[in-house]
Image: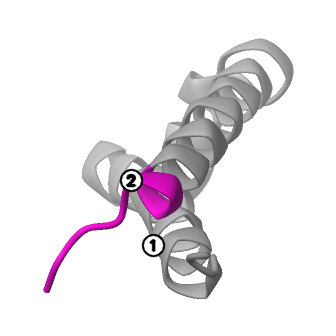
Amino acid sequence: MKLKKRKIKYAAIFFVCWLALLVFLVDGVLKFKSLVDYFGSYTFVETILWLWIILPTCAVYTFTEER
């Protein structure tokens, strides 16, 4: 599979913005420690947060059209 520069650029921009938003929400608003206390597992919370970042980024890469 050949990688396209335009698709990578849009996916990277989305990744950085989405990561910044989630870091702000989790560390600032929701408090990471309270999420770990609620779900009971640090590994589970960390995995879910990474999936919330990686899966939408892959979707942006997949659905971006190359001209």
Q: Earlier in the sequence, mark 1 or mark 2?
A: 2
Identify the disc placed on residue 5: 2
Instruction: Name the residue nearer the viewer: 66 or 27.
Output: 66
Q: Quadrant of residue 31?
A: top right
- Judge whether residue 3 is colored magenta: yes
Residue 49 lies, with reference to residue 22, above or below; the image says below
The type of residue carrying mark 1 is Cys
The type of residue carrying mark 2 is Lys
Residue at 68% of width from left, 35% of height from top? 22
Judged from the image, the secondary structure of the residue bearing numbered disc 2 is helix
Q: In this rendering, would 32 be left or right of 46?
A: right
- Could you tell me if residue 40 is visible in this image? no
Q: Quadrant of residue 56?
A: bottom right
* Residue 14 at x, y percent in the picture: 65, 46
In three-dimensional space, the C-alpha distance between marks 1 and 2, rounded to whole angstroms, equals 14 Å
Q: How is the image coloured?
A: one colour
Residue 64 lies, with reference to residue 10, above or below; the image says below
Report how many numbered discs are placed on residues in the image.
2
* Residue on which disc 1 sits: 58
* Residue 21 at x, y percent in the picture: 76, 31
If the image is split into quadrants, where does the N terminus sit? bottom left
Residue that lies at the very extreme toward the top in this rendered image: 28
Q: In this rendering, would 63 be left or right of 24?
A: left
Q: Quadrant of residue 32?
A: top right
Find the magenta span and give its range: 1-8
Judged from the image, the secondary structure of the residue bearing numbered disc 1 is helix
Identify the disc placed on residue 22: none
Residue 12 lies, with reference to residue 27, above or below; the image says below
- Judge whether residue 53 is colored magenta: no
* Residue 36 at x, y percent in the picture: 50, 41
